[in-house]
Amino acid sequence: MRNIKASSKTLYVTVYRSIFLCKESTTEVAMSTVHEKQLRILPFFKYRVAVPEPPPKPEHLQDSPAEDLRLQGLGRLPKGVLFSGFNIVHLNEARELYETLYEARDFEDFVLLAEQARSIVNEGLFVYALSVAIMHRDDLIGVKLPPYEEARPDLFIPAETIFQAIKEDRKRKDDKTIVVNAFETGSNLDPEYRLAFFREDIGINVHHYHWHVVYPITWRPDVMGKIKDRKGELFYYMHQQMMARYDCERLALELQRVIPLQDFAEKLGGYAPHLTSFFEDPDEPRMTGDYASRPVGLGLLDVNRSDATVQVEELERWKDRIMQAAHLGAVLDKNGRVVPLTVETGIDVLGALIEASYESVNSTYYGNFHNKAHNVISLVHDPDGRFKQNPGVMNDTATAMRDPIFYRLHRYVDHMFTEYKKTLRSYEQKDLEFPGIIVESVDVKAKATNVLNTFMREEYIELSHRIPLKGSVQVKYQHVDHEPFSYEIKCENKTWDQRQVMVRIFMAPVYNELGQKIPVNEQRRFFMELDKFQATLKLGQNTITRESTESSVTSKASPSFEKLVAGEADYDSDDSYCYCGWPQYFLVPRGNRRGMDFILFAMLTSYENDRVYGPEDDSKCGSSPSYCGVKDRKYPDKRAMGYPFDREIKARSIEEFLLPNMNLQKVKIQFKE
Ligand SMILES: [Cu+2]
């Protein structure tokens, strides 16, 4: 066998080269085509000054109704209404549109349909549905969605800033870029405002929006022909991690951890979003809409609007039923049968049921808890619409994370999952160990070893793609950042052969609000995943190094509108999932001025045991599989998400939890203003 291989080597090389060369030339052709498609897609994400002439119809359709029959019935949600990524009435219509766009015969048909749909359907609904379709159509592989913060800066930048930009633009005498400063949305009278650097961060909100585009509530795998592996579990894990990170920032500011919103009769805290949604033209007041503020002290009331009905009592009922399912470790399906929540898929079933997605096992009985809770909170100031008020920011996936109440709701949602995880036995040594593999040390290498500096960095965002301006106007704002760093893991392979390992790196704060050490079973909910990757250990001593920029939780920076127009993007790969993920600059928490104490945890497990068999990941996206999965592939880790911290820990301290294939390091994070 070996000889045959050796003798056919020359042939193999020739074939390989010809395939390779051939691939190279087709790639070149494909690249220009992708860029051409990109150029035709981009205008859909920009403002229109005037409604263009409808595109000419093919001859055989000349006498048919004004719009394509496939779009009939769409346009139910009126224009100018704020689209809600949590409202099932809006989402059902959006699904009809993205499925229609997805099924368009070819690219030309797709563009024609999109053009017509744009004039029929609600603006926000259009962008959402178009984005889902672009991300999944096979003939649009490589075509990128423009950065959402450039396509919809009005959902991220305070209205005061945008009006200032319009004013400055009107006074402009040349075509130089004008820079305006971002308006501050709160004051020190509100202690929660100290967290605005997190809640109102553009990257964090874009991440949340993008995740919900990648994992639509209304996804129908049978229609779309594409899997969304462990979608319910990802809903749990992605949000659990956001909560861990937020609570960590709260401790850094000596604020209490988030108190779950579990009593729906409670009077809520307030929030003022300072956001105005701009549709098409700011000179046309009908086409703009303020996101409503929530004054302090309002309580939840039944919502009864044309596009949303929710009773608070319904929420209570669903909440109790979900908690019962979590505690019993079983759910009732549509036929009233008891379906046990298994160790492998229980969390996924529960995720689909709580969110609730189309995949809920029984939406009649368990309802639509999380989505409708978003709706009811967003309409607390005008539940029956008598004042014709818009909803608040809890209405939309791109804006919800700005509001402190988001975290209170999601802390409760996270408790539901935690209650279920309590019914699973704790991991035992056999679930955690890797005999023969010893982690001797783990260090963070930055300017100083095991000390990380964080700071605020200035950034600019262009407004002129969405806001009709005469020239370029940019908003100057700040976001947190950290110095670049790497991990260095020293380990020994005492087995008889080289080993493929999965490296898992987490970090958690050490002290609680009172300055006491956090017990490990509480601390486990703070552990933030920083990275997860594969490595090969030779026999004997090994040193694994890994850059912070390679993290499995952070996203690639998406190319700007300008770069997409200029063709300066990687059109060669299907990287539509790459732009999903936590912002790289927020990889580690901001910490505080004194220097905040963290514990870094590294663990090596067997790649052979953890790997998922199936088509290899050819998406070329070393981006964010941990929070976003891999497109059209199985989630690339067989273990439960959050392993080994997803289940109760019986050990009395994190040190006692350790096995030879794990290790810890004390790390300080110092915030410098
Ligand atoms: Cu969400």
Image (cartoon, rainbow, N blue to C red):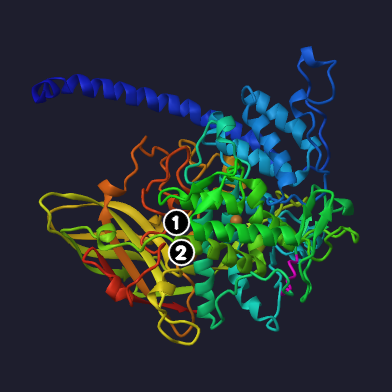
Residue at 42% x, 55% y is 641
Give the quarter of the image for residue 156.
bottom right
Q: Quadrant of the rendered structure where residue 24 is?
A: top left
Ligand 1, by image quadrant, is bottom right
Image coords of residue 46 (percent x, y): 71, 44
Q: Is mark 2 within 8 Å of ligand 1?
A: no
Residue 448 in sight from this viewpoint = no
Disc 1 beta carbon < 8 A from ligand 1?
no
Is 378 rendered above or below residue 124?
below
Q: Which residues are magenta?
A: 268-274
**Residue 405 placement (x, y as % from top left):** 66, 68
Q: Main secondary structure of the magenta part?
A: loop
- Write down the residue under mark 2: 587
Vertical position of residue 241 compared to residue 35: above or below: below
Q: Nearer the viewer, residue 240 or 329?
A: 329
| Element type at mark 2 | loop
Please say whether residue 379 is visible from this viewpoint: yes
Residue drawn at x 28%, y 74% as measured from the top left: 656
* Residue 329 to residue 334: above or below: below
Q: Which mark is residue 589?
A: none
Sooner in the amino-acid sequence: mark 2 or mark 1: 1
